Amino acid sequence: SITVANPCDSIAFPYTLSGADNAALRANLIAAIQCANTNGTADVIEFGGQTITLTDAFADYSGATGLPQVTTNLTLRNGTLTRSGSNLFRILSVSSAGSLTLRNVTISNGGGAGYASLGAALHNLGTARVIGSSLSNNSGNRAVAIYSTNTLMVANSTISGNSASQYNAILEMSGTASIANSVITGNRSTTSD
């Protein structure tokens, strides 16, 4: 018989990302999110101050998205996620069952000019907490920093320099939103705020 190794066996949470280059870091982050989604516990992924640049979408979750959708309780902390290149996609998505905390995380350049789906940085159908973080210079057609339909909390964060055709930086569609001690500035919409 052939034994196939489970990649999650080498990922113990809280988990610190590692990789020799950006491609390895991206692959490591994708694997860590997938493992967190399957283990049924609240997990933490530590970036260790590293920047991960995404150049292509991972999948489509009501719009092209750079990383696996968060479907359980997950914290990402202490790092940067950014999009580079001509491919249009958002950075993160949270399912209706998911709970994502961004702690000391910078997300930039999500979506891209002409990105048609909601939430170029963060698309939230579950629970999202943005704490001590920055969502900046994301762009697209609608609600480019955060789109949320459930529970959103933003604290001690900066939402700046985002550019949309409609709905500007944050759109809480049908749930509850709490924003405290945060700076929301320099965001632009060509049709509405």
Image (cartoon, rainbow, N blue to C red):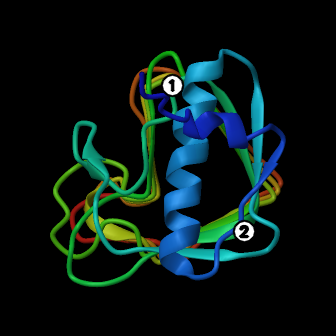
Answer with left or right where residue 8 lies relative to residue 133.
left
**In the displayed structure, would residue 95 be above or below residue 130?**
above
Q: Position of residue 164 (x, y in %)?
A: 30, 66
Answer with left or right where residue 127 lies relative to residue 9.
left
Q: Residues within 10 Å of mark 2 (few under 14, many from 20)?
A: some
| Residue holding disc 1 | 71
Residue 176 visible, this angle? no
**In the displayed structure, would residue 36 be above or below residue 156?**
above
Residues 120 and 33: in front is 33
Tell me the tag on residue 40: none
Residue 32 visible, this angle? yes
Tell me the tag on residue 79: 2
Quadrant of the rendered image containing residue 178: top right
Q: Position of residue 86 (x, y in %)?
A: 21, 82
Question: Residues at badges 1 and 2 in contact (C-beta under 8 Å)?
Answer: no
Answer with left or right where residue 66 lies relative to residue 20.
left
